[in-house]
Amino acid sequence: MATDPFADRRRRRAGAPAGWALAAAIVVAPPVARSDVEALPIFDAHVHYSHDAWEVAPTADVIALMRKAGLRHALVSSSDDEGTQRLFAAAPDLIVPSLRPYRKRGEISTWMRDDSIVAHLEDRLRRYRYAAIGEFHLYGADADLPVPRRLVQLAKRHGLILHAHSDADAIERLFAQDPDARVIWAHAGFDRPERVRELLRKYPRLWADLAFRSDHAAAGRPDPEWRAAFDEFPDRFMVGTDTFTPERLFYIPEHASWTRGWLASLPPALAERIAWRNADALIAPVWKANRERPPVAAGAPPDTPGDAAHCLRAAQAPGARTLESAGLVLVFRTRPQPVRVGERFSVDAALCPRAGAASVEGLAIDAAMPAHRHGMNYAPVLRAGGAQAWVADGLLFHMPGRWQLSFDVRLAGRTERLAADLDVR
Ligand SMILES: [Zn+2]
C-alpha cells in the first residue's frame, strides 16, 4: 500500500469514488520514514488546494504534511486562488503560487469560452505574485479560442510559465502562439513516452510533470521506455502528486516516499534532477523575478484593456493577430489571407487602450522590408471601421520576403509603435 500511490485510481476504475478509497488509504498508510525526509528533497510540481479542501485539510495541516514529506517546494494552484494564497502566507519558503483560471471547481470545461476569466486573471495578477498560470485543462483547437489566447499573452507579459493539462495538439498550438513560452506539460499529457519524447525534441522550452501517472514506474523501478525518455531528457521531467480531490492532500508524504522509491534505482544525479532540480531550475528564477516585482498601488487603473470585449471579438476573426504595448492592445488581420506578392490587400485593426489610458487620437499604418531598407510603393488609405477600429485599404507588397507591418498609434499625446512580421510569397 505504502509503495502504490495508484491504488485509489484502480479502485475508482473498479467503481468506488476516489475520495472514499483515499480516505481508507490514509488510515492504513504507515508513517513516512524519517530517513526519507533527510534523503532526497522533492519539488512537488502539482498541488491543488481549492475552496472545498479547506475544511477537510486546514492550512496548517497541509503545510505540516508537506514538511513531513520532505518537500523542498510545492507548485500550488487552486480554484479560486484563495487557497493558494492561504498556503503561501503560512509557508512562503515552501509554497510557489500558480494562478489557475478557475473560480470554482466546475469551470474546468467552460473557462476557455468564458470572457470573464480574463478579468479574473488580470485582477489576481495585479494583486498577487505567481510563477505560473495553470494548471488549466485545454485540448486541441480550443487552445486557439480568444480566452486561452489572452491567457498565453498574460503569461508572456508577466513572464510566467504555463502549466497545461493538454493533449499534444494543444501543446503545439500554445507554442505556435508564443514560441518563447515555457510550458509544463501536466501528466506528460497522459501520452506514450515515445510521443512525449517527440514533443520534448521539438520544443526545447517544454517540460513534463509525471503527476498521477502509474505507468512510468513499478516495483521500485522505472519502466524501460520511460527510462529511455529520462536518459534522453534528464533536464525536463519533474514529479507531482496532483491533489485534485481534497483527500489527496493527505497523500503528499506517501507520494514523495513512493517517488524516492523508484528514483533510487536511477543514477543519483538523474534522480536528483527528476526529484527537484529540474523543477527548481525552471521555476525558481521565474518565481524570484515575479516575487520581487512591486505590487500595484491600491486604486491604480486596472490592467484590462478599456474595451476588452471589443478586442476579444476582433480576435475571433480568422487569422487575427494580437499585438500589445504598454498603453494598448491591438488586434489586426489582413484581407485576403495570406497576403500575396503583387496583390492589393486591406488591414482591419481594432484598438483597445488599457483602462486609465486616454482613447486613441490617431493611427497610421505602413509597411517596410527591414532587410532591404525600403517601404511600399503604395500609400494605404485609412478609414473608420467602427468604434476604435480602422480599415486600411490599398496596401501592396511588391517583393516576396519578410515584411514588417507597423501601426503608429497616437495615445495621450505620444506615439506608440506596434509591429508584426509578415512572410510574403
Ligand atoms: Zn492537477
Image (spheres, helix red, strand yellow):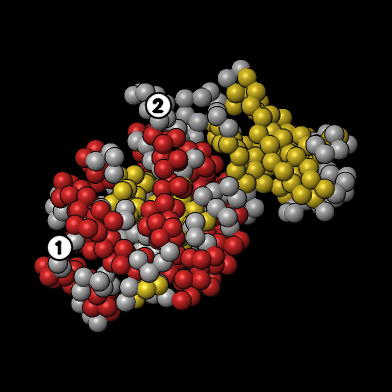
Q: Nearer the viewer, residue 252 or 405?
A: 252
Q: Is residue 365 visible?
A: yes
Image label count: 2
Tell me the kind of residue under disc 2.
Pro
Q: Which residue carries the number 1 mark?
A: 31
Q: Position of residue 159 (x, y in %)?
A: 49, 40
Instruction: Give the label, 2 or 1, closer to the camera.
Output: 1
Secondary structure at badge 1 equals loop
* Residue at 80% across, 50% down: 424
* Residue at 37% across, 46% down: 99
Tell me the kind of residue under disc 1.
Pro
Q: Quadrant of the C terminus?
A: bottom right
> Separation of disc 2 and disc 1 at Cα?
42 Å
Q: Nearer the viewer, residue 99 or 227?
A: 227
Mark identifier at residue 294? 2
Q: Is residue 85 visible?
A: no
Q: Does label 2 or label 1 sit earlier along the sequence? A: 1
Task: Categorize mark 2 by other alpha carbons within 10 Å: few (<14), some (14-19), many (20+).
Answer: few
Question: Can you say whether 325 is above or below 208 in the image?
Answer: above
Q: Position of residue 272 (x, y in %)?
A: 39, 56
| Residue 236 shown left or right of residue 72 in the figure | right
Name, please, the residue furthest toward the bottom.
Answer: 14
Mark identifier at residue 209? none
Q: Quadrant of the N terminus?
A: bottom left
* Residue at 65% across, 23% down: 415
Q: Toward which corner of the image does residue 131 lie, by quadrant?
A: top left
| Residue 112 shown left or right of residue 171 in the figure | left
